[in-house]
Image (tube, rainbow, N blue to C red):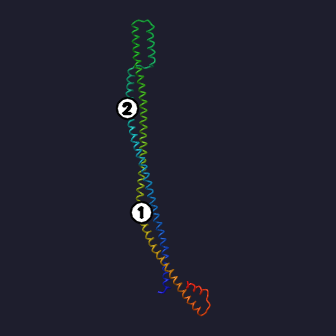
Amino acid sequence: MDESRKTGELRKEFQEKKRELTRLRSQLNQASKDKNDLFRQMKSGLDQLKSFSGKIKKFKRERDNLTKEVKELKKKRDELNKTVKQKASVRKGAEDKKKQLLEGVGFKGDPAKIKSEIKQLEEKLEIEVMAFSKEQQLRKRIKELQAIAKKLAELGVAWKEVNTMSADFTQKKKEAEESHKKVQEKADESQGKHEEMNKLYDKIKEIKTSQQPLAEKHLQAKVKYEQAKKELELVLKRVNELAKLLDEHAEENYNVKAKKRTAEVKDKLKKGKKLSTEDILAFQALKH
């Protein structure tokens, strides 16, 4: 095979490989883009998983604290309910005592009039002269009025006791109701945290389900990228080899042509012919 034909075939292969190189570079760029896009999707999912896991830990901590608080509030509420029952029992006892005293007094009217009447009768005994029998009657009446006054005094104490017990009972009942309300509020808040955690668990499950096919696609894209890269490197290597061969052939052709021209120049010199600029340059190239 002559040099010209060989060079022509090398140039043809060189052009074909360059076109193939362009195609492979395009494939490699697309494979790289696909691989990176899938990686970003996977990373986005992993970032979400990390974020959701952090939120779940936060909600769990808050829920556990609320559950603990609910437990303490329930204990306090139960103690208050127990106290309310005791106060109710004490109040009922005071009311029963008041009722008995009220029934035993047998007096309806203003208690102040009893005291006033006792005072008048005592003054009458001191300043008036009267028969013994009448004096006895007055003293008897005073004792009866004093007995009623005593019962009324006891009834007054009972009234005060009932009022005190009622106020105390009302206060404790209010505290118990407020405590129960707090228990419900904290329990609802704790339940809310629990429900938020369940929503996040569902989202995590969805992300994990979607991550598996993404990981498989990313692996396929990575393999495709490596294959394209390897193929590109092989073609690039051949292109570089061809470029070097073509450069060498070009240099060889140049030297052959220069020697031929120099021979012609020498022949002209022998024959005494005039040299052209080209002749001079060819002769100098050979000397170099």
**Residue 260 to residue 32: above or below:** below
Q: CA distance from mark 2 to mark 1?
A: 68 Å
Among the 4 quarters of the image, the one containing residue 109 = top left
Q: Which residue is mark 2?
A: 86
- Label 1: element kind: helix
Quadrant of the snapshot with the C terminus:
bottom right
Residue under the point 44% across and 9% down? 126
Tags 2 and 1 touching, CB below 8 Å:
no
Which dot, 2 or 1, sits closer to the camera? 1
Residue under the point 45% across and 62% down? 39
Please give the label number shown on residue 89: none
Among the 4 quarters of the image, the one containing residue 88 = top left
Q: Which residue is mark 1?
A: 215
Mark 1 crowdedness (10 Å alpha carbons): few <14, some 14-19, many ≥20: some
Q: Amino acid at mark 1?
A: Ala
Q: Amino acid at mark 2?
A: Gln
* Front position in the image: 122 or 3: 3
- Label 2: element kind: helix
Q: Position of residue 150 (x, y in %)?
A: 40, 18
**Residue 190 to residue 202: above or below:** above
Q: Position of residue 164 (x, y in %)?
A: 42, 28
Q: Position of residue 229 (x, y in %)?
A: 45, 70
* Front position in the image: 106 or 273: 273
Residue that extends furthest to the front in the rendered view of this protein: 287
Earlier-in-chain disc, 2 versus 1 = 2
Residue under the point 43% across and 69% down? 226
Question: As drawn, is 42 to the left or to the right of 266?
Answer: left
**Residue 61 to residue 40: above or below:** above
Among the 4 quarters of the image, the one containing residue 258 = bottom right
Q: Position of residue 60 (x, y in %)?
A: 41, 49
